[in-house]
Amino acid sequence: MEWYLIVANVLGAIGMILIFVTSAFKSKKLVLSVQAGGHLFLAVSDAFAGTYSALAQEILCLTRDIGIVTKKANNIFKIIIIILIAGVGVTVNIVVDKCNIFGFLAVLGNLLFTIDIFYNNKKIVGFKIISAVNNILWMMLFINYRIYTSAIANGASFVINVIVAIWLAVMIKKGELDSMGNKIEQETVNE
């Protein structure tokens, strides 16, 4: 394996570890805070690997996450980020990556995840399912580009997000958690 792919895999592993640990988090703010660091490492990894459509997406994800965490993500910011994710992702994929189908799928996953982050403030189960879909689409891109550490981490994140989504759905159905994943305090009845 070429030296630059080794560097890309190491940096990608660090970035994916940061993103991987967030698959067990329930708080969107905590997820996005930790993922911002992961996106930074992944962007540098993508630069080394020459995966320019992924690099563009990582920079936009980093911007998105910082905007949300710092509460700068007003409606204009959200619309601009969504348009940039779609436009830049597709354009870079067509021009640089020569219409790589996996690049288009990663852009789609990123769009779904971003729209969910921006506009789904009530359903944690949906957030985890969209996160899982995003993970599997990015995993395919990383396999295609031989960034195996990131592919493995995305696959593992997919599994954890699905498990957490199922657990949350069961706990919500039982009435122990609300739709945001917060514990519902049960009142005790004195006889």
Image: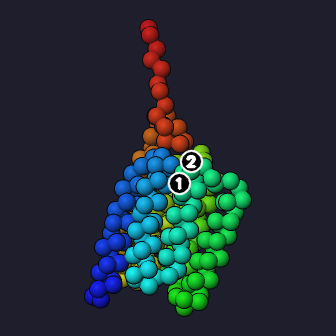
Residue tagged by mark 1?
A: 127
Above or below, comparing residue 134 to residue 124 in the picture: below
Which quadrant holds residue 158?
bottom left
Question: In which quadrant is the N terminus drawn?
Answer: bottom left
Query: What amino acid is at disc 1?
Result: Phe
Above or below, comparing residue 23 to residue 54 in the picture: above
* Residue 130 image offset from top left, x and y in percent: 52, 60
**Closer to the camera, 163 or 86?**
86
Above or below, comparing residue 46 to residue 73 in the picture: below
Q: Residue at x 49, y 37 (%)?
A: 182
Q: Which mark is residue 123?
A: 2
Whether residue 108 appears in this view of the structure is yes
| Mark 1, other Cα within 10 Å: few <14 / some 14–19 / many ≥20 | many
| Mark 2, other Cα within 10 Å: few <14 / some 14–19 / many ≥20 | some
Asked whether disc 2 touches disc 1, contact meaning CB atoms under 8 Å apart, the reply is yes
For the residues labelled 2 and 1, the Cα–Cα distance comes to: 7 Å
Q: Is residue 124 left or right of residue 166?
A: right
Q: Secondary structure at mark 2?
A: loop
Q: Residue at x 29, y 86 (%)?
A: 3
Whether residue 149 appears in this view of the structure is no
Q: Is residue 135 left or right of residue 14?
A: right
Q: Which mark is residue 138?
A: none
**Closer to the camera, 145 or 33?**
33
Query: What amino acid is at disc 2?
Result: Lys
Q: Is residue 55 left or right of residue 19?
A: right
* Residue 24 image offset from top left, x and y in percent: 39, 51
Q: Is residue 108 left or right of residue 158?
A: right
Q: Residue at x 56, y 63 (%)?
A: 63
Which quadrant holds residue 10?
bottom left
Q: Secondary structure at mark 1?
A: helix
Above or below, comparing residue 180 to residue 76 in the picture: above
* Residue 60 image offset from top left, x and y in percent: 56, 68
